Image: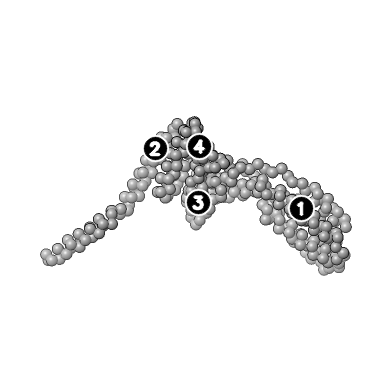
């Protein structure tokens, strides 16, 4: 069958493309003020909060991570989602894309063999239509990877289906259109931040998180990171000690202000005060 010959040649031409280089699973969160912070692995958006793991020391192969919670309203979600799509696509291409595409083309070649070898044209038609459905779904389920080539294969397969329908005198049917996904704009991947970048990101999120314990933990992490950098001979962090002092002072002031808004007296003092009031009230009542 002419259509099957054309399709077989097309399948043979679909050789894997060189994979894009990709590093660890790092992503950027873009803030509304124009800054960014690095997330190790994908972040989680939970109601009005976003939770992620921020690299704070260690090595690129084995980073030390700090869990951070930020208000979702501080994130530029349109910009962040665009970066996330690009990063996911590049990781897919680098890690699984060619292998998945090889499996697809191998399966298509197997189906072609079945169609060519069977004498039951009705069965051949059913196989071809099933293959077309699989091909139609593939780009959407694989980040649009090599969708132009998949669409070319579908076009030739449609010709084979039409030919088989004519041979079997099957009623005509409307071939479903294959949606073309919008190409994903490839952006630079996030890389492991330097010691200075990690410190700056720590100071950045300290002022944004509303959890007191998390703020203290982040500043303690900054101190540990500076100590680690000094031990490893990492230079150019001279002024960061003063930055930590300032951040510590601001955090301490914020904690004191928060505490001033609460009744932090010990439970026994509250009880004694309550009892004292009752005794005073009782005495006054007796005096009356």
The answer to the question of whether label 2 and label 4 lie on touching residues, with beta carbons closer than 8 A, is: no
The answer to which of marks 4 and 1 sits earlier in the sequence is 1
Residue at horizontal 64%, vertical 47%? 91
N-terminal of the two: label 2 or label 3? 3
Left/right placement of residue 20 relative to residue 160 reads left
Which residue is under mark 2? Answer: 245
For label 1, the SS is: helix
How far apart are labels 2 and 4 at the CA level? 18 Å
Left or right placement of residue 173 versus residue 216 in this view: right
Q: Position of residue 90 (x, y in %)?
A: 65, 46
Instruction: Using the image as rendered, state which of residue 71 and residue 103 is in the foreground.
Output: 103
Q: Are marks 3 and 1 in contact (CB under 8 Å)?
A: no
Q: Residues within 10 Å of mark 4 (few under 14, many from 20)?
A: many
272 vs 91, left or right, is left
Q: What residue did someone put label 1 on?
A: 105
Q: Are marks 4 and 1 in contact (CB under 8 Å)?
A: no
Q: Residue at x 38, y 44 (%)?
A: 251
Residue position for label 3? 51
**Distance CA(mark 3)–CA(mark 4):** 22 Å
Q: Earlier in the sequence, mark 2 or mark 1?
A: 1
Distance of mark 3 from mark 1, alpha carbons?
A: 40 Å
Front in this rendered view, residue 196 or 156: 196
Is disc 1 surrounded by few (<14), some (14 to 19) or many (20+) residues within 10 Å?
A: many
**Residue beneath disc 4:** 195
Q: Image point 47% across, 42% down: which residue?
A: 202
**Badge nearest the viewer, 3 or 4:** 4
Residue 120 placement (x, y as % from top left): 85, 66
Percent x, y of residue 279: 18, 62
Against 103, is 120 above or below?
A: below
Which comes before the other along the chain, label 3 or label 4?
3
Tell which residue pokes out farthest to the left in this image.
287
């Amino acid at each position: 069958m002419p259509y099957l010959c054309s399709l077989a040649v097309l399948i043979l031409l679909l050789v894997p493309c060189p994979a894009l280089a990709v590093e660890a699973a790092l992503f950027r969160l873009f803030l509304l003020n124009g800054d960014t912070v690095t997330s190790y692995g994908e972040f989680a958006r939970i109601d009005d909060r976003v939770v992620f793991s921020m690299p704070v020391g260690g090595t690129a192969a084995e980073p030390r991570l700090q869990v951070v919670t930020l208000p979702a309203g501080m994130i530029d979600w349109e910009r962040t989602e665009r970066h996330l799509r690009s990063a996911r696509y590049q990781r897919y291409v680098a890690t699984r894309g060619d292998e998945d595409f090889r499996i697809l083309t191998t399966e298509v070649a197997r189906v072609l063999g079945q169609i060519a070898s069977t004498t039951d044209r009705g069965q051949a038609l059913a196989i071809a239509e099933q293959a077309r459905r699989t091909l139609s779904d593939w780009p959407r389920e694989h980040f649009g990877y090599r969708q132009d080539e998949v669409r070319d294969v579908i076009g030739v397969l449609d010709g084979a289906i039409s030919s088989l329908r004519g041979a079997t005198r099957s009623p005509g049917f409307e071939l479903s259109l294959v949606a073309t996904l919008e190409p994903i704009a490839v952006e630079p991947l996030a890389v492991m931040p330097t010691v200075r970048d990690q410190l700056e990101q720590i100071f950045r999120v300290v002022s944004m998180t509303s959890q007191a314990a998390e703020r203290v933990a982040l500043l303690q992490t900054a101190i540990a990171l500076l100590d680690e950098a000094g031990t490893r001979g990492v230079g150019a962090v001279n002024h960061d000690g003063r930055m930590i002092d300032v951040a510590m002072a601001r955090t301490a002031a914020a904690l004191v202000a928060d505490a001033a808004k609460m009744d932090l007296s010990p439970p026994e003092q509250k009880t004694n005060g309550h009892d004292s009031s009752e005794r005073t009230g009782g005495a006054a009542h007796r005096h009356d």
